[in-house]
Amino acid sequence: MKNFLSITDCSTEELKELLTESAELKKLYKSGKRDLSLAGKTLAMLFEKPSLRTRISFQVAMGDLGGNAIYVKPEDIGGIGKREPVKDIARTLSRYVNGIMARTFEHNTVTDLAEFATVPVINALTDQLHPCQAMADVLTISEHFGKIDGIKIAFIGDGNNVARSLGFAAAKLNMKLVIAAPAGYELDGESVEIANQILKETVTQTNDPKQAVSDADIIYTDTWVSMGQEEEKQKRIKDFAGFQVNTELLEAAPANAKIMHCLPAYRGLEITDEAAESKNSIVFDQAENRLHFQRALLKKLMSS
Ligand code: CP
Ligand code: NVA
């Protein structure tokens, strides 16, 4: 495993090992001990989009492991692929740092970085995928349910990067994902097929949120307007009416179903404040687990 660009690039065994290592490092750090596997190592972090969780958790994870992280905004380097080609950025950075993580609009930008870098490249969200989020979510699920196998997630809202990575994680780790999206916002057929070829009947879709949550262990949602889609905001708010995670929807779900959201949450749109704050909400456990999963990921990719 050189890079971490998509969950589909990893074997089930590799993903399970990462989850085990995440849990072990979490325990170690909570007990006040340290694993300094990345002493003297540096991660370059390229961001074309805003971030709270990803930026801070990667930076803290590098520091925890004894290393350093450098935050790079596109304007610092004249834009990714604008002042110079992505392949030149990849090769130059490889001479200075031991790993590159990138949050980009186009997915091709991270695959190009990975093709030309001689150091590991981590996908920290693209328009297509958010694999670190999905794996931190699986870690959270395993903690709350004591298992991953057979867990049923109802994803309410946009068939987006987060939904796609969750679908791939479900396929590799034997969960079920039902996506309830308005017509025209479903997850694309090719992604559904990729997931279902890995594991039969992993991802299904419906346009009925109540049906999706009726037997769900988890109700998951994400913004209706992903970064880069701001111009579509008003249309999307109209189109997603009826797809809000709120008390009415929760009444159609099992009483103990957990509520998940990758955050940031837009209260009053995809989720009500009441649902986000309910006793079944585990959204901050998800946020915390970004740190624990990414520590394990950085150690695996960068310690050799
Ligand atoms: N969930 C997530 O990736 O959050 P940020 O955009 O704040 O990094
Ligand atoms: N789907 C959202 C996730 C944010 C973490 C976006 O891409 O903006």
Image (cartoon, helix red, strand yellow):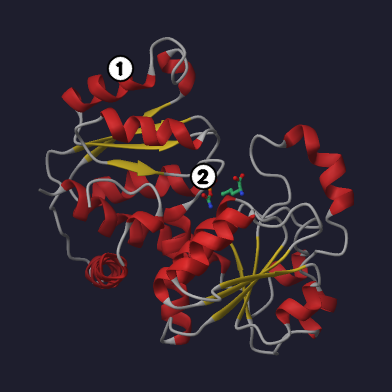
Q: How far apart are labels 2 and 1 at the CA level?
A: 28 Å
Amino acid found under the numbered disc labelled 1: Asp
**Where residue 200 sits in the image (x, y, percent)?**
50, 76
Circle 1 Cα neighbour tier, 10 Å, few/some/many (<14 / 14–19 / ≥20): some
Residue at the spot x=78%, y=80% of the render? 211
18 in relation to 255, above or below: above
Tag in front: 2 or 1: 1
Tell me what residue is drawn at x 72 percent, y 45 percent: 225
- Relative image position of residue 31 (x, y in whole percent): 23, 72
* Between 230 and 38, the one nearer to me in the picture: 230
Above or below, 207 against 42 in this view is: below
Residue wearing tag 1? 88
Name the side, left or right, on which 151 lies relative to 222. left
Q: Earlier in the sequence, mark 2 or mark 1?
A: 2
Query: Considering the numbered disc 1 on the image, is that residue within a helix, a strand or a loop?
Result: helix
Above or below, 123 relative to 243: above
User: Is 54 in front, or is 279?
Assistant: 54
Residue ID for mark 2: 52
Task: For the residues labelled 2 and 1, say whether their Cβ atoms are less than 8 Å apart.
Answer: no
Q: Looking at the rendered structure, which numbered label has been put on residue 269?
A: none
Query: In the image, what residue occupies the spot 34% across and 62% down?
Result: 292
Classify residue 303 as left or right of residue 81.
Answer: left
Disc 2 marks a residue whose amino acid type is Leu
Please state which of residues 15 and 97 is positioned toward the viewer in this rendering: 15
Label 2 residue near ligand 1, CB within 8 Å:
yes
**Residue 221, can we see it?**
yes
Residue 63 in the image: state x and y as whole percent: 25, 46
Q: Secondary structure at mark 2?
A: loop
Q: How many marks?
A: 2
Asked which quadrant contains residue 95, the reply is top left
Residue 290, percent across and down? 42, 58
